[in-house]
Image (spheres, rainbow, N blue to C red):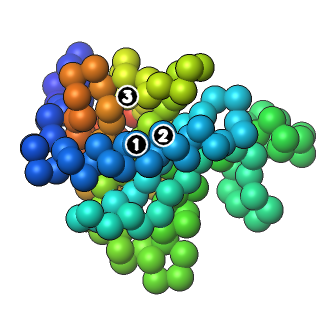
Amino acid sequence: MQSGQGPLWRPLKRQDSAAAEQMVQRAAELAKDSHAQTRYAAVLVKGESLLAWGTNGVPFPGEDHCYCKFGETGHHDRCRTHAEQRAITLAREGDGWRMLQGSKLIYVRLQADDSVRQDEPHFCSRCSRLALSLGVTEWIFALSEGLVGYASADYDQMARLRW
């Protein structure tokens, strides 16, 4: 990727798109159930199998948090764990980190009317680094162009530029 260019995304192939579309719908259902003000969900898949899922929200006891200014004061009620961070953490419990190699992360954000937000991808350098280091190969988003995938290295580079 050259300076000034966006990450290189690719439209999903028809055979990949059907399974990914089902996972996008599943992620949207999960996000609707989130009690957070902003409703995001991530699902990790390998082949057509669901490995783990997560929604954003208040950290569970013992769960890493977003390192926000609220966490420094001990008031984690306003702190959030990212959906993708939670899905990766759940997937790698025990020996699960081995399953993450070659997996794909599907990320969904909802609008106020519960429709899937399709403007531009969400970029997070911390979650990108975590996913890349554990072998997640692709990030998938539902955009107005359709379902698109970003190679993890491209997504990571853009996330670092935007963070």
Asked if labels 3 and 1 touch by Cβ distance under 8 angstroms, the answer is no
Q: CA distance from mark 3 to mark 2?
A: 15 Å
Asked if labels 2 and 1 touch by Cβ distance under 8 angstroms, the answer is yes
Residue 19 position, x and y percent, is 25, 52
Label annotation for residue 25: 1
**Which residue shows up at 84% across the image and 41% down it?**
77
Q: CA distance from mark 1 to mark 2?
A: 5 Å
Badge 1 amino acid: Gln
Q: Residues within 10 Å of mark 2 (few under 14, many from 20)?
A: many
**Which residue shows up at 15% across the image and 41% down it?**
12
Badge 3 amino acid: Pro
Reading the image, the residue beneath label 2 is 28
Q: Earlier in the sequence, mark 1 or mark 3?
A: 1
Reading the image, the residue beneath label 3 is 121
Q: Earlier in the sequence, mark 3 or mark 2?
A: 2
Q: Residues within 10 Å of mark 3 (few under 14, many from 20)?
A: some
Q: Secondary structure at mark 3?
A: loop
Q: Secondary structure at mark 2?
A: helix
For residue 102, what is the image quadrant? bottom left
Choose mark 3 or mark 2, whichever is in front: 2
- Residue 129 visible, this angle: no
Badge 2 amino acid: Ala
> On the rendered structure, is 81 left or right of 61?
left
**Which residue shows up at 89% across the image and 45% down it?**
74
